[in-house]
Image: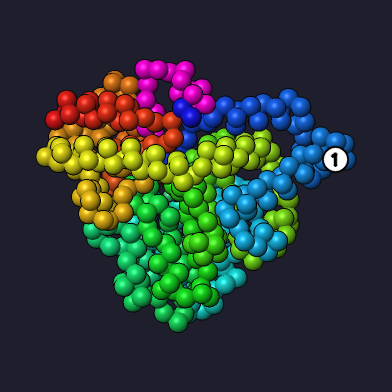
């Protein structure tokens, strides 16, 4: 599949290892956008000429496409709302939906060491409601020290009769851990809405709303091979084309939505299970290599997954580490000198901010064992 990514094949000396920040786009996505913009570009929901009608239709079809991609078992009882990414998506859930659920004395459970985008919107709702005299308790969603995923036993102590909402992350953007969110549902019971930040999972592994039993799925299209400025919120049990009041609000990112549909088509044809196997296998090569250089490189979070054959889940498609002697920015520059593009320094982490001063390597389907081997050779030379 590598040769379907023109930016990758067009730069043989460079290795893109920053897909968790934004992914490169396969030709099919670029072609779909070009085709749309050169044949039928118009605004949606306005006008009665064919391009306007077909654009309106494509936005509606795209909502159904997202539902199908997420394995929605009841598509006529759910809604999809398009956003610019996960940040806007989580804000949308917080602003348009959460306040209606909360009364004085209720509690929400939210992650304190995941991405800031999955904490600040919930805290803002708490503040806004407090100004209206509605006090909402915020409890921390606890994690297991060694594996980094959510701790069901500790969660059981945090959940109470007043818990009305839980926000979780599917795959951690610093640790690369699968947070095992299906266990969260087992603890909170069937009635508490769960909102899933799927920014690091959609496009990387199969994401099934039925399997995970969540009420909201929020993701970034641009991390799932679509254009920048794309994303979506899937909401269970919310009828209609758009669960925000007012329906069509402003001009949707129609070319972005076209790219999202093309990206989902591409991912489905490629097989998200195959993509997962490929990137997890490459990640094992990388983490095994880093594990052999533990005197020089400290790998963050999800520690158990480093032990080969430990039976503990493997890291997903990203790993974050620190060089014990070289500053993260400098390491980023040095790695680029060798052709590697990685994320360095902060990672927008809420709470603990363990990721500060570290380098993150994230993979996608176009990466190869040779690239990982070359990176390990460079990292070895920096010991
Ligand atoms: N949540 C997670 C887990 C992320 O990794 C990111 C992107 N770094 C976001 C939210 C925010 O995504 P976006 O920048 O597309 O809004």
Q: Residue furthest right?
A: 48
Rendered image coloring scheme: rainbow
Q: Residues within 10 Å of mark 1 (few under 14, many from 20)?
A: few
Q: Residue at x 23, y 58 (%)?
A: 146
Residue 84 image offset from top left, x and y in percent: 57, 44
Camera-side residue: 319 or 81? 319
Q: Residue at x 54, y 62 (%)?
A: 210
Q: Residue at x 34, y 56 (%)?
A: 113
Q: Which residue is mark 1?
A: 47
Magenta residues span 3-18
Residue 236 image offset from top left, x and y in percent: 61, 63
Q: Quadrant of the C terminus?
A: top left
Q: Is residue 48 left or right of residue 124?
A: right
Up-down relation of residue 58 to residue 135 (above or below): above
The answer to whether residue 130 is seen in the rendering is no
Tag 1 secondary structure:
loop
């Amino acid at each position: 599949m590598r040769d379907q990514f023109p930016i990758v094949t067009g730069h043989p000396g460079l290795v893109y290892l920053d897909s968790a920040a934004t992914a490169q786009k396969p030709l099919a996505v670029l072609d779909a956008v070009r085709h749309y913009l050169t044949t039928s570009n118009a605004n949606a929901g306005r006008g009665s000429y064919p391009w306007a009608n077909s654009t309106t239709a494509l936005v509606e079809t795209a909502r159904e496409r997202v539902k199908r991609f997420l394995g929605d078992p009841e598509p006529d009882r759910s809604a999809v709302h398009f956003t610019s990414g996960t940040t806007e998506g989580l804000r949308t859930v917080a602003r348009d939906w959460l306040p209606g659920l909360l009364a004085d004395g209720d509690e929400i459970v939210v992650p304190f060491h995941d991405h800031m985008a999955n904490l600040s919107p919930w805290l803002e709702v708490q503040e806004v409601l407090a100004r209206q005299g509605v006090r909402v308790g915020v409890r921390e969603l606890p994690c297991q020290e060694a594996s980094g995923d959510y701790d069901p036993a500790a969660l059981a102590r945090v959940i109470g009769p007043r818990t009305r909402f839980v926000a979780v992350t599917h795959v951690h953007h610093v640790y690369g851990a699968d947070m095992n969110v299906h266990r969260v549902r087992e603890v909170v019971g069937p009635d508490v809405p769960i909102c899933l930040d799927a920014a690091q999972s959609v496009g990387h592994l199969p994401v099934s709303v039925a399997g995970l039993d969540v009420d909201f799925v929020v993701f970034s299209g641009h991390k799932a091979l679509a254009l920048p400025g794309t994303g979506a919120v899937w909401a269970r049990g919310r009828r209609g084309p758009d669960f925000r009041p007012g329906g069509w609000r402003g001009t949707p990112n129609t070319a972005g939505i076209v790219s999202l549909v093309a990206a989902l088509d591409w991912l489905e044809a490629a097989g998200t299970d195959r993509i997962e196997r490929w990137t997890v296998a490459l990640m094992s090569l990388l983490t095994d290599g880093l594990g052999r250089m533990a005197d020089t490189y400290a790998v963050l979070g999800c520690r158990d997954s480093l032990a080969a054959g430990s039976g503990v889940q493997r890291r997903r498609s990203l790993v974050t580490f620190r060089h014990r002697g070289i500053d993260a920015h400098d390491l980023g520059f040095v790695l680029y000198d060798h052709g590697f593009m990685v994320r360095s320094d902060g990672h927008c982490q809420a709470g603990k901010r363990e990721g500060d001063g570290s380098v993150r390597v994230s993979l996608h389907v176009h990466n190869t064992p040779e690239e990982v081997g070359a990176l390990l050779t460079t990292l070895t030379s920096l010991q």
